[in-house]
Amino acid sequence: MNKYLVTLFTVFFLTQVKAQNSFDIFSYEAPAGFTLKANKEYLFYSKTEGKNYCQLFLYPAVEGKAAVEKDFETNWNFFACNPDQKVDSAETKDLDSLNGWQMIMGAARGSLNKQMFAVTVSTFTKENISYYVASVFTDKKFIPIAQEFIASVVPDENKFVSSHSNNSEQLTDINTPKNIDIAASAVITKSTTNFDDGWQATMLPDYVRLNKAGTEMRLHYIDKTLDDARPNTVDAPEYYWGKYVEPYFTVSDPQKWSGVQYPVIYHLQGNAVERATGKPCYVAIKIVYGGGARPIVVIAPNHSSYQQQFPHPNDIDPFLNANRFAVSASDIIGTWKGGGGGGVEYYNAYSGTYTGMSAVSSTDEFTFNSDGTYSSMYRTASMNNGGSQFGGQDFKGNATVADWSITATNRFGGKTTTYNAYFIAVKNGYLLYMADAENSSMSYTLYKSK
């Protein structure tokens, strides 16, 4: 098979191709005779002829590292590298360029169920835009088809919007305020976080994806509509398994956690095959409740690898803290709001007669301006047995932004305060979290109102 791997690397942009379909920022020509298997998170076409098959993939454009070698390495490790199928580094790599695009096309051989196959990854990078096309096939007759498909993909740079790019604390309670419409197009500049322990987090539309050494985790966002639709007769693990696992993996005999423990552990796991690639793996789901259901899907190379990393289902929970992304001065511009409140009703312990109530509510608002200044407003309202009191404070000053902090002058008592700060990804957008570096109890979880 190695005799024909290199022949794949004759692919260049063919401007004459009549692309008839669209995906992400691309137009492309659908391969004749292939079946469309997926077109949401990625584009996937497949064709099977007897024991032979060919699979073609196109992934959305992302904010790259402005270095095609690094982008290729990231793509290869994510898509192709699989020790269980004897695929490690690319056996062949070709570098080329055209019209400002740098291209690296790599290939290697693998084996699945005693059948040899070839896997290729073609990475294209131009300034801050990067994307890749991949193929998996078992017969050299599919090479021309893979070439034609890669050549038919034409990016429209004007459509690109940077939404994907290149020390554990206490879990933050993420609960988007009610009736807040966070713009679906909301993106941030630094939507990838590289943690010191080797995990990489990437903000995606439906979940935060974590990757490390062949293991992937998907931190799905709270989805109130989905939560409310769950029938009382269906247990949480089976319900979310059907939403987040079954569409993407074939699992013959999933095992439910049977240990007796409180709070109840919502967990399912089992040997699986990824539908899109045919790769064997081990999949588990853990449902953590905090402001709503927060399903975590784990995809490990095999059961041994999974068990080594997560001996107990509760070992998965701390990874929810990886939903954090660096702030930047341009991303925080605008007005951010938050708040909270609560109340208590009083009854006579002997007669049961209602004797009144007390309640308190507060609102916080920060406005960050493009000239480096800020203003903030704090308002409180309290009621006790019919009497009401109101209060508040206002501040103005300068704000300095670093990756993980915001420093504001002229805060309480005229002091300068540094806040530990980061973005939290939620469904259709993100929240801004700020906590006083010297008093962590003074914290804000804010949504962008304008």
Image (cartoon, helix red, strand yellow):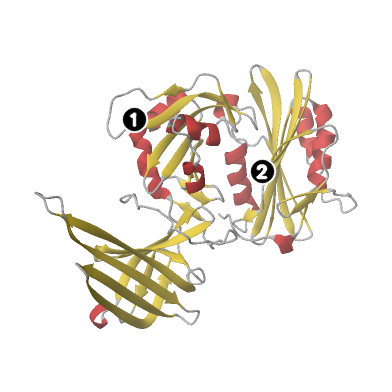
> Hey, which quadrant is residue 361 in on the image?
bottom left
Q: Nearer the viewer, residue 341 or 350?
A: 350
Up/down of 190 relative to 238, above or below = below
Up/down of 403 relative to 5, above or below = below
The structure residue drawn at horizontal position 40% and vertical position 77%, both measured from the top left corner, is 399
The residues tagged by marks 2 and 1 sit, at their Cα atoms, a distance apart of: 32 Å
Q: Nearer the viewer, residue 20 or 382?
A: 382
Q: In the structure shown, which secondary structural element does the residue marked by tag 2 occupy?
A: loop
The structure residue drawn at horizontal position 21% and vertical position 57%, both measured from the top left corner, is 345
- The amino acid pointed to by label 1 is His
The structure residue drawn at horizontal position 65% and vertical position 16%, both measured from the top left corner, is 114
On the image, numbered disc 2 is attached to which residue?
42
On the image, numbered disc 1 is attached to which residue?
312
Q: In the structure shown, which secondary structural element does the residue marked by tag 1 occupy?
A: loop
Q: Residues within 10 Å of mark 1 (few under 14, many from 20)?
A: few
Up/down of 331 relative to 415, above or below = above
Do the CB atoms of the residues marked 2 and 1 lie less than 8 Å apart? no
Residue 258: image location, x then y, percent: 35, 22
Residue 1: image location, x then y, percent: 75, 25
Name of the residue lying farthest toward the right: 16
Q: Residues within 10 Å of mark 2 (few under 14, many from 20)?
A: some
Between disc 2 and disc 1, whose residue precedes?
A: 2
Residue 257: image location, x then y, percent: 38, 25
- The amino acid pointed to by label 2 is Tyr
> Hey, which quadrant is residue 262 in on the image?
top left
Name of the residue lying farthest toward the left: 350
> Hey, which quadrant is residue 113 in on the image?
top right
